[in-house]
Amino acid sequence: MKLTLWIIFPLLSMLPGHAFGQNTLGFPLVHHYDKTVFQGGSRTWDIKQDSRGILYFANNEGLITFDGSHWKQYPLPNHTILRSLYIDEQDRIFAGGQGEFGYFEGGAGGALHYTSLTALIPLHKRKFADVWNTAAHGGSVFFRTSDRIFEFTEGRIVVHPATTEWRFLGYAEGRLFAQDREGGLLEFNGGSWSTLQGDNKMEGAAVAKAFSIGKDSVFFATISNGTYLLAGSTLRRMDKGPREDLYTPSLSKLSDSTYAVATSTAGCLVRDIRGRVIQRIAHAEGLPNNNVSAVFADADQNIWVGVDNAIAVISYNSSLKYFRPNLENDVTGFSTRVFEENLYVSSSNGVYQAPLKLSEADHSFCQGSFSLVAGSDRGEAWRLEQINGQLLLAHNSGIFRIRNGIAEPVAMGMGSWIFLPLSSALPVAQTLVGTYQGLDMLSYANGRFWNSGTLSGPADSYRFLEQEENGDIWAAHPYRGIYRLRISADNMKYDVRLFTNDDGLPSPFQNYVFKINDSIVFATEAGVYEFDSATQRFSPSPTFAHFHGIPIKYLRDDADGNVWFCSGKKVGVARHADGGARHEINYFPEIEGLHTSGFENIYPYDRHNIYIGSEKGIIHINYEKYKRSSSSPPKVLLSSVKTAGKKDSTIFGGYFAKSSTNMYEQSSSQIPKLHPAFDSYHFVYGSPSYGISNHVTYSYRLEGYDTDWSPWSTATEKHYTNLPSGTYTFKLKARKNPISESEIIAYTFVINPPWYKTVWAMLSYFAASLAGIYLLVKWQKKAWRNQQLKYERQLAQMRYIHQLEIEKNEKEIVKLQNEKLENEVLTKTKELASASMHLMENSGALSKLRVELAKLNLSTEDESELKRITSLLKDVERNTANWDQFASYFDELNDGFLNRLKATHPALSRNDLKVCAYLRLGFSSKQIAQLQNISVRGIEIHRYRLRKKLSLHTELSLNEYLTTI
């Protein structure tokens, strides 16, 4: 390598110093972030990237980080400007600012914490200004200020004072270099600084950057646009010629042969090792302004630049580029053709051409510039087509031929859309031209084209035309349907049939016709359709079933059988999968919404050069390179985890500890155990895929809550609320396309149960439950026993009551029977008494009769008869004569009535007692009169006398009184 450099050195020294050459045709896409986005200061001084892909910016407001989705700010303790950065193998970020230096690293809670090293400086050396450079060498980290260099090694600091003024400090090719204003370029060896041989003063210019080239060689660049090469121990100037007057404060190596340069007036330059400008990206190419203070190439060769009030990323190594024919006034690209080693772009204002070096596989790296084809402006240049070895242009003003940078009129007048050759044999004699109002016929002979006239037929705007093998012409109108045109044999007229949704199309709108793989197909809102000539109807194409349900507006096949298409705002390709007939659809999210909507056009020149019409000219895709880059899986990062309870809290700041396998993952000590009041969690994540590649989708899953992975989404945040206590693991993965997924990252956290759900609470609940069960069983047994006793008492009571009821019923029965018997006895007694009384009365009458018969004087014969009669009367009298016996029986039946009455009223006569007995039996005066054989009046008198004897008051009747006796 030394020999090679010494051979090319004389050649390099003869080249003019850093002259601006032509730019490349392809411009990388530029995206910038205003300071209101990253919440920083107006100036960025240094840029670095760690092993995870996170970017770090030394800014006026301190350290700013970016993970591809989210920005974070970390001010220095003294809130001063941060000037320089260095990141070691452990991803510690060493930072140098104004009067302060130290390092940031992940600490408790995964947050980035700052450790100041100024306390290690000897007291008399602690006052210093800006730390302009930070570098490492041999296990030590060096911080450069203007008057001293601090060397930090294992917890102690050594100070290296400047001879005059330290102007640079840097590391390259395993060597540490510094520059003194008077002493020139120095190298650090064995703890001291030694001067390099050769032109080490560098003409008094301060070094901006040093980096290795190849092996054992170091490239130096100064802030005044100078370049030097250190081979071995000898330093020599590389640019002997005049230099462009530029201030170049920062450089970054891209490869062994190229590097990026920050300038204060010309934006960002990409140069080769000879100093030749390969590309310039300035304000015209997309930077916010041309004052670049810092430049850095990340791991994917994106160029990051710090400009005034913004940070921009240039997708320099991307497979997607812009071809912008007019940088001052961007034009919309309608068509592209490569013709005779030139690239032609028809646009919204004419045709532009640029020379191509066809030996360059990727046309975007061809150097050159676009120029307007004379005569092609003043209107839209719709379509370029190569026919019969000539380049034709369909223009708003008619038809042109492009030759030698000039647009030559072929047929002026009506605006034209498209050319359709009517034969595949060359030369093509007849070409159909779709115009704004119908069809024209373009004829060719003897090397020239001319317009044969307008065909007679239904007038319409025919922008899409294709010819079938049988000669039928198919035309599409986005707002009417599909036309089938048949041209007459003399090519003078045509007839038309319109097909709509009545003929099988999904809709009469948004239908287009294309020829793919020599077959006519129709792009619709529901996919790709074909026409069945037998049924005269449209139906979904089985060949293009992979487009089913996808609204298609444009189709174009390439030489490899891939089908390029536009769907809405998306551009994609259906490519052969595994070399078979099956197609796999891939989209290009990087350019979503950037292509020419309504006038879609794709020109697949070859695998390295796919041209797509854009609102800023043409988008160029190196498809071969794109496939290689998109096959590598992206990285995914968890930026932060926040929780909300009584107050918000960040429980994870984005930095896992490095494991024993040198991987960043959560350790068991980093698993937080959180209060149950924290039940709301916010996860923020991203992917360090920057620039044009920052089109990543994510899928997540919270184990312990989600049952499956979420659908893929571009969202970079997820919020969960009302999480119950338990252990959760948030898992996250990312992808750029369906076949390249990142590794899964995981973050575990624990929500402690509330006090009433802790283990001790559960044990106490268990013990209380056992005690409760025991007491419950005991109480239940007692209750059962009491219930049994109560039941037995109730049963005994019921039995007693039942017995009482039985006895009562028996008594009632006996009582009723007794009452019945008493009533029967009473009745019989009354009957007996009545009969007895009658017999007694009859007995008295018979006695009287016997007396009277005795008084009769009868004969002897009659006297014997009289004696017999008298004897009979005596017998009757004897049967009824005993009143005392009657009275005794009467008293027994009436509870001693006569005895009580006699005892109460001893003056009562026998006859009085008899009348009282009759009255007690309920006999009336008349009945008593009959029994006594006296008149009723006699009875009344007798009753009156009884009242006197009984001393009854007038208001009390005799019967009532007798019932009381």
Image (tube, rainbow, N blue to C red):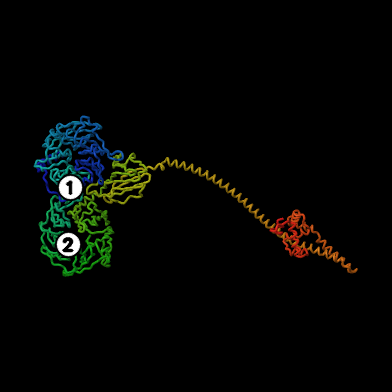
Query: Quick check: can you spot residue 292?
Result: yes
Secondary structure at badge 2 equals strand
Q: Quadrant of residue 562?
A: bottom left
Q: Nearer the viewer, residue 413 or 891?
A: 891
Whether label 1 touches label 2, CB < 8 Å: no
**Residue 895 place in picture, x, y as percent:** 73, 55
Residue at numbered disc 1: 288
Q: Residues within 10 Å of mark 1 (few under 14, many from 20)?
A: many
Identify residue type, mark 2. Answer: Trp
Does the image show residue 521? no
Q: How many marks?
A: 2
Q: Quadrant of the N terminus?
A: top left
Q: CA distance from mark 1 to mark 2?
A: 38 Å
Q: Residue 887's spot in the image, x, y percent?
A: 77, 57
Type of residue at label 1?
A: Pro
Name the residue nearer the viewer: 102 or 925.
925
Q: Using the image, tell me which numbered label, if any, was put on residue 742.
A: none
State which tag comes first along the sequence, 1 or 2: 1
Q: Is residue 105 left or right of residue 860?
A: left
Q: Dot 2 surroundings within 10 Å: few (below 14), some, or many (20 or more)?
A: many
| Direction right: furthest residue | 860
Q: Quadrant of the C terminus?
A: bottom right
Q: Residue 618: x percent and y percent?
A: 18, 54
Dividing the picture into quarters, in which one does residue 221 lie? top left
Q: Nearer the viewer, mark 1 or mark 2?
A: 1
Percent x, y of residue 638: 29, 44
In the rendered image of this protein, does residue 6 appear above or below residue 876? Answer: above
Q: Please state which of residues 489 and 259 is positioned toward the viewer in this rendering.
A: 259
Query: Compared to 253, does 872 lie above or below?
Result: below
Q: From the image, tell me which residue sits under label 2.
A: 417
Is residue 450 toward the left or the right of residue 543 in the image?
left
Secondary element at tag 1: loop
